[in-house]
Image: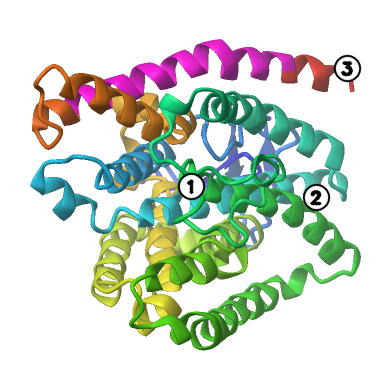
Amino acid sequence: MSYFLYGGFCYISEPDRTKKKTKKKKNFSCDGENKRIKHTGAAIKCNPIQNVTKNADPYHPAKLYGLDHLRAFAISFVVIFHYQSFGHPNWVNTLGSFGWTGVDLFFVLSGFLISSQLFAELSNSQTISLKNFFVKRSFRILPGYWLVLAIYYFIPAFREREALPPIWKHLTFTQNIGLNIATGGTFSHAWSLCVEEQFYLLLPLALLLIYRKLLLRKGAYILALIALLGFAIRAFSWYHLVTPHQGADDFFRYWYMYIYYPIYNRLDGLLMGIAVSALLHYQPVIAKKIAKYGNWLLPLGLAILAFAYWLCIDQHSYQGTIFGFPVVALGYGAIVLCAVSGGSVLYKYKSFITEKLAGLSYGIYLIHKGIIHLVQQHLESHSIPKNGNLMFVLCMISVIIGAILLQLVVERPMLKLRKMVLSKG
């Protein structure tokens, strides 16, 4: 059995059974970042590599092809879901009806990658450099976000809807708190970036506290407790904040405001990502056993998502509200675990298309609504129907071109600047 460490977490490849058996030794060696760790002992302690991956990024995974596939799927699913808000072919409703869960997949991936980076740093240095962590996150997230935000506020034609929330809510990443889509529906998809930023603020501080209080061994209980609190908070929100508006024409507005957007109701995906990362980092023996069935994790995850789809046929119902999010997170968590299990179909195969889409996913997420709005307005005046397949294709091409420009003009230069800043300490 061979182990690889990537970004501080351990993923497993099946043994080469053609090789001769060698005498077992109770040690292992690490050659550095992205190198094989050869383990031949019975008791496994998988320590993180010394060089934490420089690209453990929730929008740009480095060399794990399985995560590229998942990120590409997530952004495609989200865009198709949002395309329902514009003129669209009938098939978009069918394909995109469950597309809201693409954001949940992003949450699982973010929880997994960011916690992996932090777990590795804790193991290496027994602390977390908050300065380096926030510098990395700031240079990665803020420049593109600020540019697109400026476009929304200074170029009204870019707005897919008429209402913008106060700019301070965007600048402080608190847009998701009390978000009324009737009065602040433009750039509303930034709510998930607010959840991510709040997560980035809380997670390293929480891990430092847990580590210093010697509570890491109780990490599973802490995750379970937070997940149970999520059930309780959603139930409270449902009965006291949402149910009083049932039957009203604007019921959905209160459901989104009090259930869908707040971080305390959407922690399930982030917690699932942390749980997968903790399993691989701190429980390698269990991870080894699970990895033997890596390919079975994909159909298992899909089966769980099929159940979640049934559960959330009426997403605004009681069962969809209380149980839908954790079941979706569980399904995507199994698929993420499949994607990092050596030998699984998601892990093995590289795709140029998914790799590029994964790299562009952040830019696509930021600009896709505004671009679709502009393209449809312009092309409709040239007799191209909004609800046609041609319009869909032209909109998607335009979104990808816009994301490429954003990457070239903003993202890559900022990542180079980030490298310079970090190198100077």
Earlier sequence position, callout 1 versus callout 3: 1
Give, as a three-letter code, the residue at label 2. Answer: Leu
- Label count reads 3
Q: Name the residue under label 1.
A: 188
Q: Position of residue 395 (x, y in %)?
A: 25, 26
Q: Which amino acid does label 1 sit on?
A: Ser
Residue 26, compared with residue 409, is above or below; it is below
Within the magenta stretch, is there residue 403? yes
Q: Is mark 2 on a helix, strand or loop?
A: helix
**Where, by quadrant of the figure, is residue 379 drawn?**
top left
Scheme of colours in the image: rainbow
Q: Is residue 338 above or below residue 166?
A: below
Residue 424 circle label: 3
Element carrying mark 3: loop
Q: Is residue 211 above or below residue 25?
A: below
Mark in front: 2 vs 3: 3
Q: In the rendered image, which residue does mark 2 sit on?
A: 122
Mark 3: give few (<14), some (14-19) or many (20+) Cα within 10 Å.
Answer: few
Task: Identify which amino acid the numbered label 3 is placed on.
Answer: Lys
State which tag comes first along the sequence, 1 or 2.
Answer: 2
* Magenta residues (range): 393-417
- Is residue 259 visible in the rendered structure shown here? yes
